Amino acid sequence: MAEYEKRVLLGLSGGVDSAVSARLLQRAGYEVLGLYLDISETAAREDAISTADFLGVPLTVLDISAELEENVNRPFCESYLKGRTPNPCILCNPSVKFRMLREKADEMGCKYIATGHYARTRDGGVYRALSENDQSYMLCRLKKEQAENLLLPLGELPKSRVRELAEEFGIPVAHKPDSMEICFIPDKDYASFIGRRAPLPPPGDMTFNGEVIGQHRGIHTLTVGQRIPGLYNERKLYVDKIKPESNEIILALWEGLFKSEVRASEVSWLIDEPASPFKARVKVRHTKWEMPLCTVTPLPGGEVLIETDEPFRAPAPGQAAAFYVEDRLVGGGIIV
């Protein structure tokens, strides 16, 4: 039993954050095992293997290509073709990454799972990181059971300190750049990725105040809140709505982007599911500053109504809405 209580399965990616997490867990007295989720990226896989060897962490390499295609890649493409803006990490975390970690941890006799996310856990709850590079938003659709025995060693550290620790520990990937792209679209060419799976939407009208003022190259090339190049009557215009049924982009001035009410579906809760409205803060994109106060009202069918005290900028269908009570992440859903 004692061995089980101190054994943790860490998602080891081959990057700095998970490597430092491994060493910190070891220093805290945990027996660390590693799991590399393989999508056929040779360089990343080799980095994970060499890092695990350096740290003395037994590593399991698990091919997740089929799981990723079914649960992330396909829904990602379908969402874009419907005029939505999905966040692939938020799709992946509950359905692939953390599910695989928990399943393998149970198989391997590990009580805990861990990752290199910048967030905190305490008594089964997930909290915002103490540093500016908080990543709790990316965890907003985890299932409650996926967070119950989750360890996040970097939650109280700034990125600069993690880099310093990597050097102090002599970790081989200490100077490896942070990954900024989607793991399955490393060249950032969304259109080509989607086009290999389905016919791309054709060009269509862009309208402002009911008047056609230009053409777009396809609804999949734009997102709500995005600025349109050039000026219209010396004013900047932004995407306000994407209408796939008419292949139309509705534009607005900056002040027209702000909303006070939005619905979210497919809500996951990291607390006991609430039965009545409650006050929270809501985050609708991975930014450092935009978290307005709101009232979250549960609706039938797993949806919620979000009513903000102050208007917030450009909530985009397909993106996630994360709910916080003080610093605690309590749940999240997909904006509809």
Image: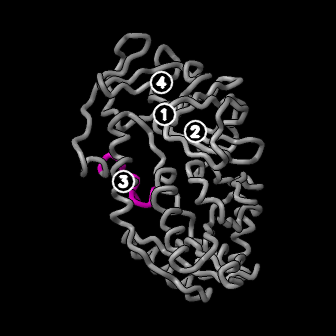
How crowded is the residue under tag 2: few (<14 C-alpha within 10 Å), some, or many (20+)? many
Where does label 1 land, which residue? 301
| Residue type marked 4 | Asp
* Disc 1: CA contacts within 10 A as few (<14), some (14-19) or many (>=20): few
Q: Residues within 10 Å of mark 4 (few under 14, many from 20)?
A: many
Q: Is residue 184 magenta?
A: yes
| C-alpha distance separating marks 1 and 3 | 25 Å
Residue in front for this viewpoint, 43 or 97: 97
Q: Name the spot of residue 146 as percent of width and height, x first.
A: 58, 60
Please state, as top left, top right, bottom left or bottom right, where the N terminus lies in the image.
bottom right
Which residue matches tag 3?
Answer: 73
Q: Earlier in the sequence, mark 4 or mark 3?
A: 3
Is mark 3 in CB contact (under 8 Å) with mark 2?
Answer: no
Q: Which residue lies under the disc numbered 4?
A: 240
Left or right relative to 276: residue 204:
left
Estimate the x, y position of residue 278 in percent, counting from the top left. 71, 32
Q: Secondary structure at mark 2?
A: strand
Q: What segment carries the magenta color?
A: 181-192
Residue assigned mark 2: 321
- Which of discs 4 and 3 lies nearer the camera? The answer is 3
Q: Earlier in the sequence, mark 3 or mark 2?
A: 3
Q: Residue at x 65, y 23 (%)?
A: 311
Q: Secondary structure at mark 4?
A: strand
Residue 116 vertical position relative to residue 256 in the rendered view, above or below: below
Query: How far, Cα to Cα, is label 1 from label 2?
Result: 17 Å
Q: Mark 1 or mark 2, which is nearer to you?
A: 1
Q: Position of residue 304 (x, y in %)?
A: 57, 32
Inter-mark Cα distance, 4 to 2? 18 Å
First in residue order: circle 4 vs circle 2: 4
The amino acid pointed to by label 3 is: Asn
Figure coloring: one colour
Q: Main secondary structure of the magenta part?
A: loop
